[in-house]
Image: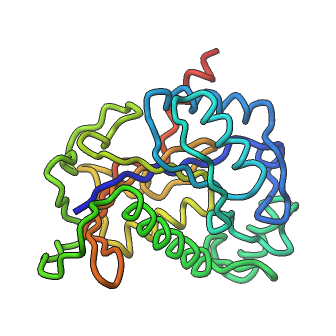
Amino acid sequence: MFTFSLTLIRHGETQYNRDGLLQGQGVDTVLSETGIQQCEVVGRYFRDTKFSNVFVSDLQRTIETAEIIRRNSRSAAEIVLEPLLRERSFGIFEGRAKEDLKNAANACGQSCRDFTPPGGETPSEVRLRFKKFLKVLFRQMLDEHGPSGPADSAEVESEPGCCTNGDADPSGAELTGSADDGLHGVPVHALGVSHGTYINIAIRHIVEDLDCSLPAGMKLSQLFCSCPNTGISRFVFTLRKSEAGPVLSAARCIFTNRKHHLETQTAQ
């Protein structure tokens, strides 16, 4: 068995975020001054966390976020640009107010989450992109950091959602709100820097499709709330080798959409 953590971070604020405008993939903007400060704060928050791998959406706002985090932390991992982590495409509404998208969805009797704008991606298409990313991630993490022995065909796969690594924190453990929550006994840590809507869809896939275990007492309102700029979510995955490739044995949510690191910025 091989266990690793995946920490997902949304990029820092851009002027489009501040103005309530949609960016998607077609509007490739840089961080605002506030966004730069947010990234410096979250970078210092992770100053003692050594990420073994860093995967970043290939848009300017995420690249800049990852570079600032890397500069303020002790992580020396190379930044790998990953188009599969790009934001959802909002088609003809990119560059326009979020309210325009909401009004168009209401006119069709749909929520913004379910509405597909002309020329944009469906939520299912974004979820498929994330599934492809996980497939790439699982294989790379096993190849680079997993046990070197051959696949054990006689090994019994654990039930999804159960923690199989005895060194990992139990799913019901009380969280302290620190940067290393859920990392005790987990030897390898990956970082993914992406976008708000993409991360929300990714969380839904992990929780709803991978039978992910949740922290005791976690409310759905917190689990699926909107991810703020530099909001942090963390999951722990346990894999095993098979002749067909990596097999997911367990998925565990540590926290989602954490933002208390920004309180220090607000207080300044």
Residue located at (53% from left, 69% from top): 133
- Whether residue 2 is visible here, answered yes or no, is yes
Give me the residue at 69% from left, 49% from top. Answer: 62
| Place of residue 185 in the rendered image (x, y in percent of width and height, measured from the top left) | 23, 43
Location of residue 250 by image quarter: bottom left
Give how far across and how far down residue 259 sits, in percent: 52, 37
Q: For residue 195, say whether it is visible.
A: no
State the count of labels: 0
Q: Quadrant of the N terminus?
A: bottom left
161 lies above or below 257: below
Relative to 36, 175 lies left or right: left
Q: Whole-percent x and y of residue 4? A: 34, 53
Residue 47 vs residue 162, the one in the foreground:
47
Residue at the (73%, 36%) spot, across then down: 35
Frontmost residue, 207 versus 9:
9
Q: In this image, 138 relative to 100: left or right? A: left
Which colour style is shown?
A: rainbow
Q: Give the residue drawn at x 73%, y 42%.
A: 64
Image position, residue 260 (x, y; %): 49, 32
Q: In the drawing, does residue 266 fall left or right of residue 28?
A: left
Quarter of the figure that contains the C terminus: top right
Question: Depth check: 95 or 25 in front?
Answer: 25
